[in-house]
Amino acid sequence: MKLLRVEIIANRSIEEDMHDAFRKAGIVRHYTKFPVVHGVGTSGPRRGDHVWPEENFVLTTYCEEEELDAIVDVVRELKDFFCDEGIKVFVSKAKEIL
């Protein structure tokens, strides 16, 4: 089994839509969420202050390659629909130690 770590960074405004889409597709049943993250990416600053009020969240899950394909499909649809919001997906190999 090839275990992958999938990290999704997205604008908080699309969070509920993302969870709904994952539920509908039957994927990302287990995850860790960092509810508020700040930073600067290609979509601009997200600092949660009066100048840059938007914020992101990070959702991390572990899955096999088949589920990764479904996750990418859902995120691609969300990016197409929410074209002005930042959404990024990062994938790396994972190894469960304990």
Image: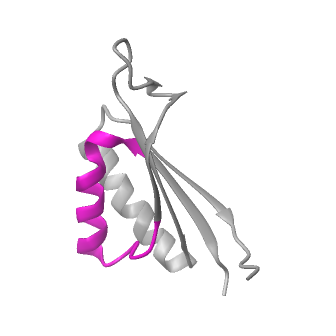
Q: Which residue is located at x 34 percent, y 22 percent?
A: 53
**Closest to the observer, 79 or 51:** 51
- Give residue 92's quadrant in the image: bottom right
Q: Quadrant of the N terminus?
A: bottom right
Magenta span has 42? no
Please provide percent x and percent y for residue 86: 40, 36
Question: Is 87 above or below relative to 49?
Answer: below
Lateral position of residue 77 relative to residue 6, left or right = left
Residue 83: quarter of image: top left
Please state if 11 lies on the left or on the right of 16 as rendered.
right
- Residue at image position (41%, 39%) is 56
- Name the residue located 41 percent from the left edge and 44 percent from the top edge: 10
Q: Residue at x 37, y 55 (%)?
A: 75
Q: Position of residue 11 (x, y in %)?
A: 36, 39
> Is residue 12 inside the magenta stretch?
yes
Which quarter of the picture shows residue 93? bottom right
Q: Main secondary structure of the magenta part?
A: helix
Total numbered badges shown on the rendered structure: 0
Q: Is residue 64 left or right of residue 95?
A: left
The residue sitting at the bottom extreme is 1
Can you give x and y, in whole percent of width and height, for residue 98 in the image? 73, 83
Q: How is the image coloured?
A: one colour
Stretch of the chain drawn in magenta: 10-31
Decide if residue 33 is on the left or right side of residue 80: right
Q: Nearer the viewer, residue 95 or 87?
A: 95
Q: Considering only vertical position in the picture, is 72 above or below 69?
A: above
Residue furthest to the top: 51
